Image (cartoon, helix red, strand yellow):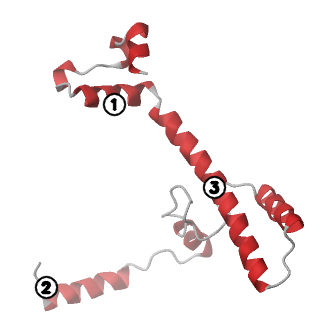
Amino acid sequence: MASPSKAQIKANRQNAKRSTGPTSPTGKLKVSQNAITHGIFAASPLLPHENAKEFSALCMSIADVYPPVDAIATSLIERIILAIWRQKRLRIAEAARLEISSSPEMMIREINDLLDLSFSNRLDAHSISKAQEQTFV
């Protein structure tokens, strides 16, 4: 790939001056969540749609069973809490994905792909009988 010319570099710098992004605290908060899809690797332990009271109850119940006695124990307890919370989040995401993949539309798409049917011969949800449907499951 060719390196950019001096004119391109100058144009990019001028464009960057106009592209400031959000400036209000609300706008900055909103765009900070743009990259979150499932939240498994989110920096914040609690996502906007999650129940703060439930997370707090989890923290308290773990701390009751494993009271932190020093900095290392505190760090380990935090890791346990985050692992449990993220595992719960992952189970919810997995269940949603399975629900989506078991929809008639997705099942038909997978069947068509498996059978490698040409476009004109592709099946739709109405062209499969109940008996045929059972053989695909």
Residue shown at the point (52%, 61%) measured from the top left? 36
- Badge 2 marks a residue whose secondary structure is loop
Please report contact status of discs 2 and 3: CB closer than 8 Å, yes or no. Answer: no
Residue shown at the point (78%, 78%) measured from the top left? 74
Which sits in the foreground, 127 or 91?
A: 91
Amino acid marked by disc 1? Glu
Residue 69 x %, y % = 86, 81
* 3D distance between C-alphas at marks 3 and 1: 28 Å
- Badge 3 marks a residue whose secondary structure is helix
Q: Quadrant of the N terminus?
A: bottom left
Amino acid marked by disc 3? Gln
Residue matched to label 1: 110
Residue shown at the point (66%, 66%) measured from the top left? 45
- Examine the image and state in which quarter residue 85 appears: bottom right
In the image, which disc is placed on residue 87? 3
Question: Of label 1 and label 2, which has the lower sequence position?
Answer: 2
Q: Nearer the viewer, mark 2 or mark 3?
A: 3
* 3D distance between C-alphas at marks 2 and 3: 45 Å
Which sits in the foreground, 73 or 31?
A: 73
Amino acid marked by disc 2? Ser
Residue shown at the point (48%, 64%) measured from the top left? 35
Which sits in the foreground, 71 or 118?
A: 71
Please report contact status of discs 3 and 1: CB closer than 8 Å, yes or no. Answer: no
Q: Is residue 104 left or right of residue 81?
A: left
Residue matched to label 2: 3
